[in-house]
Image: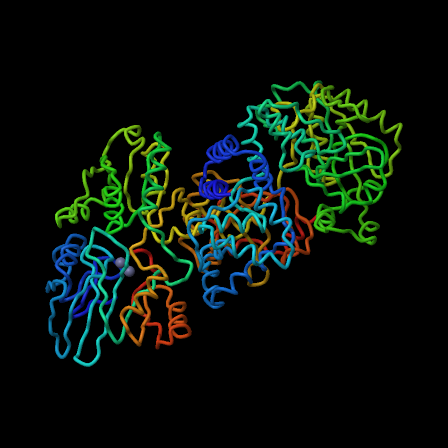
């Protein structure tokens, strides 16, 4: 546990991604099983102790510390785990914390009534940093700037394996990943995982470069489909066993029983999750509402039924067909559809694409008439490889819309950008007030970031933690893909993919449009 | 802080010593520091008052006692024959070989600072922190170590602690650290070989230690060093969130102020029955004095002080 606490602190304080990877990989090399596997589970957020709650830990601390002083301290520190770690009044020197697996075992098996006593004992023999690490582990959500992908990248580096290979079996394995480490260290075979037990990492596209790519690419080599404004999903079916995964591999089956209960056959399919009747998609917001629910009501399922527009097939029954070219996978997919009639799955249409000009007009027409996000341009010979291989699949988004808005708040960024105010909330006039319509943290150059950061610092009117409210004086030209109704924002609208297109240092805020004006102009 | 006719200055930090008073009473060291920082004419008249010597002002005897904060730092005892009031200025209880040790001054009313007046502040032994630094230097021979430290006090203390741990290589200085390091050396505090960063090649700084003001460590200036480990020596570094916010990779919890327990210890050691708390987290310390120590306590807001940084 001692070493893992040190690792967590270093990870929290090291800004460089490569150095974080090296830290984790070095830790794997010197730490025995099962501790390193448990550490991996913790770093990838695959280990939670549901019966230990942050509020409970606060109560434990408050039993030993003046409540008023605890409150003042918490207000200053801003993090429960760290407040408890620093304020804990007892320390008995000379004890070593038990190894990580013993702590995990205790966290898992200690009956609820004995938890306070166990935690108190550990707090008393641990250093402040070890206390912090322990509380973070117990309550989950490390927030140390380590993503699941980064942890797996470190594992790949440690074992000198390809990240893809690890991704491929990852979702079929469980902590403490003994067979995984055996394989990585050459002491055992690659763990076998059945196709329907896991999520298979997705193949992703790159944006097309209008100036360079069209000249180089021959349209005859490509297949063109709509780019849908939904959620990329993977549907895994094996007889009665069905699971729906998001693009990051989260199992979202529970929110969409209308899909999992109404499909049949055996396959792994790649497609776009949408809601709407008769395969006519409703706006993204309706989908978002269903996605945010843990469970779904009958009413929602009938007003906004879910379906998948399928565009690729990874496994045909048990057969892995990812090494076949796209054009053959498509043929297998069509045949599979013929054999397995579906009510919640539809095949993605292949669009006419004899010349780049015709693709250009299709893309424009799709955006104007149906609100499509653009088109996908996929190489017919492309095999299905996880990640983002260059030159295989392109997305060509429709042209963005633009709106002028006033900067309202700046928030500190993360990682490399943590010393900058790099996330900006912006708004438009509503009567005499400015109401927020969105938030953007991209679209500007490094030089512009320096200027925006400076503007935030020099024009702060109040602060809330990492957020500064600024004088309503700077106009930002925001590019976005679409505007939709939303009940989640006070303004009643939500922008898709907003980014800062230009900084209008010259433009007076009075000239920014009003909420009602932009609603009229852009709402779909 | 407005200029006064007569000002007693506890120590040379910018939030305690300002330009433009008519007459300044302070230890000779503090006067030297003020002159070095603000020029020989930063006050019209200087009245050096060495430690433990008494000077009469009207009905009141004034005596300065060491505060253990930085070179020249002093507490002020005001005594009218009936009531003894001690104003601590900034102070600490831990060992610091760059200045005289804090001394307990019994009194009736204690006016104490409270920069780290929250129970989350429990400063570790600074020697352990220096070991952390040396270990990091050892583990990263290709990288420079850039330590943010205030130019008065903290910079010299970090250097001295390094020397006391046996580090005898040249330590490099940001230009802004130079003047006060020289002044400390002239006062007999041996800081070893110090050199300005100057125009050396980037690669020359691999494995070296550079001391700079906190404002410089994340600045453009820091790009002249090879992949620097950004360190910062400050009591605030106890809070990881704060270190992360400031982009500090190696926090060194080295403070020139009392931590929470030292504040409580001092309050009890002086025997004061009335405590006025200022300069920091007044609310927590006042609350503790009232409810746990049964003392009279209140916050004292002092003009012109901003958020209590280390200075
Ligand atoms: Zn001060
Ligand atoms: Zn000071």
Depth order, front residue of B235/A120: A120
Query: In the image, ligand 2 is in what quadrant?
Result: bottom left
Residue A469, visible in the rendered structure: no
**Residue A37, quarter of the rendered image:** top right
Q: Left or right: A143 with respect to B190?
A: right
| Residue that lies at the very extreme toward the front in this rendered image | A94
**Residue A40, quarter of the rendered image:** top right
Q: Left or right: A504 with respect to A260?
A: left
User: Residue B171 appears at what percent x and percent y?
Assistant: 24, 38
Depth order, front residue of A396/B103: B103
Q: Is residue A307 above or below residue B17?
A: above
Residue A16, visible in the rendered structure: yes
User: Residue B110 appears at what percent x and percent y?
Assistant: 28, 72
Q: Is residue A425 above or below residue B114?
A: above
Depth order, front residue of B107/B247: B107
| Residue that lies at the very extreme toward the bottom in this rendered image | B82
* Residue at point 36%, 52% (across, down): B124
Q: Left or right: A377 with respect to A59?
A: right
User: Residue B258 appears at what percent x and percent y?
Assistant: 32, 60
Depth order, front residue of A60/A463: A60
* Residue at point 31%, 34% (across, down): B224
Total marks in image: 0
Q: Is residue A395 above or below residue B302?
A: above
User: Residue A98 appears at what percent x and percent y?
Assistant: 52, 45
Q: Left or right: B119 with respect to B303?
A: right
* Residue at point 35%, 63% (across, down): B280
- Coloring applied to the structure: rainbow
């Amino acid at each position: 546990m001692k070493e893992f606490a040190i690792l967590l602190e270093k990870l929290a304080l090291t800004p460089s991604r490569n150095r974080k990877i090296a830290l984790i990989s070095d830790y794997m090399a010197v730490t025995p099983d099962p501790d390193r596997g448990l550490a991996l589970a913790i770093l990838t957020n695959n280990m939670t102790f549901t019966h230990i709650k942050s509020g409970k830990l606060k109560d434990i601390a408050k039993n030993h510390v003046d409540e008023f002083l605890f409150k003042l301290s918490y207000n200053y520190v801003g993090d429960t785990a760290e407040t408890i770690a620093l304020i804990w009044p007892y320390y008995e020197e000379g004890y070593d914390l038990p190894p990580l697996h013993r702590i995990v075992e205790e966290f898992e098996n200690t009956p609820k009534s004995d938890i306070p006593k166990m935690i108190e004992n550990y707090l008393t023999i641990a250093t402040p940093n070890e206390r912090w690490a322990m509380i973070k582990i117990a309550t989950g959500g490390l927030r140390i700037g380590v993503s699941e992908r980064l942890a797996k990248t470190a594992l790949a580096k440690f074992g000198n394996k390809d990240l893809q290979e690890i991704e491929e079996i990852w979702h079929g394995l469980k902590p403490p990943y003994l067979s995984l480490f055996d394989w990585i260290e050459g002491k055992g075979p690659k763990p076998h995982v059945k196709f329907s037990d896991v999520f298979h990492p997705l193949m992703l596209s790159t944006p097309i470069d209008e100036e360079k790519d069209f000249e180089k690419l021959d349209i005859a080599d490509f297949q063109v489909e709509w780019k849908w404004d939904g959620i990329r999903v993977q549907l895994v079916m094996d007889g009665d066993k069905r699971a729906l995964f998001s693009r990051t591999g989260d199992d979202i089956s529970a929110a969409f029983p209308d899909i999992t209960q109404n499909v049949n056959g055996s396959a792994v399919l790649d497609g776009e999750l949408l809601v709407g009747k008769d395969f006519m998609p409703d706006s993204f917001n309706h989908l978002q509402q269903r996605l945010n629910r843990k469970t779904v009501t009958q009413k929602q399922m009938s007003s906004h039924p879910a379906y998948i527009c399928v565009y690729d097939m990874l496994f045909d029954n048990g057969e892995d067909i990812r090494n076949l070219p796209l054009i053959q996978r498509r043929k297998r997919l069509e045949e599979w559809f013929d054999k397995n009639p579906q009510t919640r799955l539809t095949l993605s249409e292949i669009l006419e694409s004899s010349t780049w000009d015709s693709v250009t007009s299709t893309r424009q027409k799709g955006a104007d008439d149906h609100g499509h996000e653009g088109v996908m341009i996929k190489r017919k010979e492309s095999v299905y490889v996880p990640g983002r291989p260059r030159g295989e699949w392109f997305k060509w988004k429709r042209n963005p819309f633009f709106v002028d808005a006033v900067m309202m708040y700046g928030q500190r960024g993360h990682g490399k950008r943590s010393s900058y105010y790099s996330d900006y909330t912006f708004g438009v006039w509503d009567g005499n007030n400015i109401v927020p319509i969105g938030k953007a943290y991209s679209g500007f150059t490094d030089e512009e970031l320096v200027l925006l950061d400076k503007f935030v610092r020099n024009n702060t009117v109040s602060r809330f933690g990492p957020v500064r409210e600024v004088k309503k004086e700077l106009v930002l030209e925001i590019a976005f893909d679409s505007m939709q109704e939303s009940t989640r924002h006070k303004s009643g609208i939500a922008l898709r993919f907003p980014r800062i297109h230009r900084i209008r240092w010259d433009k007076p805020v009075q000239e920014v449009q009003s909420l009602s004006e932009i609603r009229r102009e852009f709402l779909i | 802080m407005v200029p006064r006719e007569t000002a007693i200055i506890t120590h040379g930090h910018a939030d305690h010593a300002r330009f433009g008073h008519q007459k300044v009473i302070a230890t000779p060291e503090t006067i030297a520091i003020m002159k070095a920082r603000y020029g020989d004419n930063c006050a019209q008249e200087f009245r050096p008052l060495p430690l433990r010597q008494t000077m009469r002002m009207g009905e009141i005897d004034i005596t300065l006692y060491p505060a253990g904060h930085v070179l020249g730092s002093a507490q002020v005892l005001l005594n009218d024959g009936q009531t003894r009031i001690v104003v601590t200025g900034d102070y600490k209880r831990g060992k610091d070989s760059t200045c005289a040790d804090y001394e307990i001054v019994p009194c009736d009313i204690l006016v104490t600072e409270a920069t780290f007046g929250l129970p989350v502040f429990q400063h570790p032994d600074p020697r352990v922190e220096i070991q952390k630094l040396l270990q990091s230097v050892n583990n990263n021979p290709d990288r420079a170590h850039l330590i943010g430290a205030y130019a008065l006090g903290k910079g010299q203390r970090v250097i001295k602690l390094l020397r006391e741990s046996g580090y005898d290589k040249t330590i490099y200085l940001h230009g802004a650290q130079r003047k006060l390091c020289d002044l400390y050396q002239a006062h007999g505090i041996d800081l070893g070989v110090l050199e300005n960063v100057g125009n050396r090649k980037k690669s020359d700084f691999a494995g070296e230690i550079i001391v700079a003001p906190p404002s410089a460590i994340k600045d453009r200036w820091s790009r002249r060093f090879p992949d620097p480990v950004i360190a910062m020596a400050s009591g605030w570094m106890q809070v990881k969130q704060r270190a992360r916010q400031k982009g500090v990779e190696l926090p060194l919890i080295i403070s020139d102020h009392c931590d929470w327990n030292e504040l409580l210890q001092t309050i009890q050691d002086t025997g004061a029955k009335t405590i006025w708390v200022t300069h920091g987290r007044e609310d927590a310390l006042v609350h503790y004095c009232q409810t746990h120590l049964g003392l009279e306590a209140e916050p004292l807001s002092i003009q012109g002080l901003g958020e209590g940084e280390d200075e």
